Image (cartoon, helix red, strand yellow):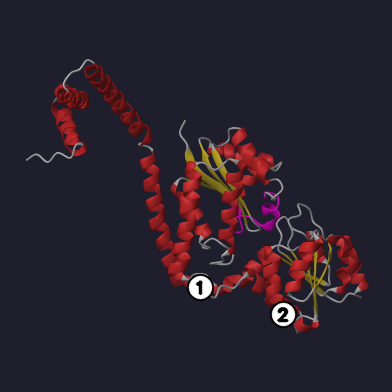
Amino acid sequence: MKQVLFACGVNHHTAPVAIRERMAFPADILPRALSAVTDHGVAREVAILSTCNRTELYCNTAEPEGVVEWMADFHSLKPQDVRPYLYLLPQDQAVKHAFRVASGLDSMVLGETQILGQMKQAAESAQEAGTLGLLLNKLFQRTFSVAKEVRTATEIGASTVSMSAAAVTLAERIFASISEQSVLFIGAGEMIDLVATHFAARKPRRIMVVNRTVERAREVAAKFGGDAAALTSLPEVLHEFDIVVTSTASPLPIVGLGLVERALKARKHRPMFMVDLAVPRDVEAEVGALNDVFLYTVDDLGQVVQAGHDARSSKVEQAEAIVSASVHEFMHWLDTRKAVPTLRALRDHAERLRRTEMEKAHRRLAKGDDPQAVLEAMSQGLMNKLLHDPSHALNQAEGDDRDELQQLIARLYNLHND
């Protein structure tokens, strides 16, 4: 059955956060999802990339349509409800997409580097789940090389306006000075670490990190001279903070409408600035309707970072050229894979002939025949057997078929007859 390199998914270009969060694969269910794809025969190989801005499946499959149906079914969605937001990318389109994603060309923040690490993690997760085979392994290894080349040759990530910086920019539109505000970070992952770095540079009055694992919260808070607490203390401390940034891996919202309403009441309705960087979202959407809350999602921040894209247009063109050339090289490798069964069969055929002649030679040597004569006979026998099939085919051919076969044999055996 023919196998096809295939990628499908949703991202910030094709789907709003409300859709992306329903199609995400949190880390705790990722191994089960990977195994389900191959166990159910949907694909021979699969890797899943799931971030706040995209969810993508890279597959080696004979049934691309089956991948779409599986993806919808896994999330308890109907395929027809998912299709309007999906991009379906076969073969070279899938390769080009992978290269562009890893290079930061498809990111909300043009040239951002975090996505490369996320793709490497996706490949590692597939490797651990046993769903990464020859084709996808080759794709990802080449993807990482292309991303490195793009970033080295173009410096496309230089002067990038990050999501973290955008969060600070938006906060400064609400508050005259962040140095007079208290900032709460919910979660203690890489994204929170990045955002906290930008806010800490503004020297806010107070910083606190809350997380399910208090030890991890303390590690992050210590970098910025902040406090740490367990996530369970959130109802008691939320009202103390003017700025709240959240990014956890929770499958359900952890900051509900009622919780924020109580916090606003305790604050006597002083405004709160909230940034929800999680997908699925950490903050219930209804919170954004409250009069004293300024709630922003990853999609909202994306509008801020777009401003710096045009200034890097020349670097984008150079990066796209590198990607295009690399796609051509990868597809050439993929095409050569089609000849592998024939090459293997040819070698097996030659090996059988070799063994036959070797057995004859061993028998003659055992009888005491002259070794020189045995070697001569073995080489003659092997040569005759190897040349028999092409010689017979050429003698049987007629007309144009014979001319074509003659040219082919000359090319195969590197014959340069006048």
* x and y, in percent, of residue 128 in the image: 61, 44
Question: 177 and 46: which one is in front?
Answer: 46
Is residue 152 placed above or below 136 in the rendered structure?
Answer: below
Q: Residues within 10 Å of mark 2 (few under 14, many from 20)?
A: few
* x and y, in percent, of residue 327 in the image: 41, 53
Tag 2: residue type?
Answer: Glu
Mark linked to residue 310:
1
Q: Secondary structure at mark 2?
A: helix
Q: Which residue is mark 2?
A: 172
Locate residue 321: give its quadrant.
Answer: bottom left
Number of numbered markers: 2
Q: Residue at x 62, y 33 (%)?
A: 39
* x and y, in percent, of residue 335 in the image: 37, 42
The quadrant of the picture occupied by the C terminus is top left
Tag 1: residue type?
Answer: Asp
Question: Taking the image as drawn, is residue 56 in sight?
Answer: no
Q: Which residues are magenta?
A: 10-24
Q: Residue furthest top?
A: 367
Q: Residue furthest front?
A: 368
* x and y, in percent, of residue 160 in the image: 56, 72
Is residue 52 placed above or below 391 in the rendered structure?
Answer: below
Question: 277 and 414: which one is in front?
Answer: 414
Does residue 267 appear to the left or right of 6 in the view shown?
right
Question: Taking the image as drawn, is residue 358 in sight?
Answer: yes
Q: Residue at x 48, y 49 (%)?
A: 139
Does residue 243 appear to the left or right of 59 in the view shown?
right
- Does residue 139 belong to the magenta stretch? no
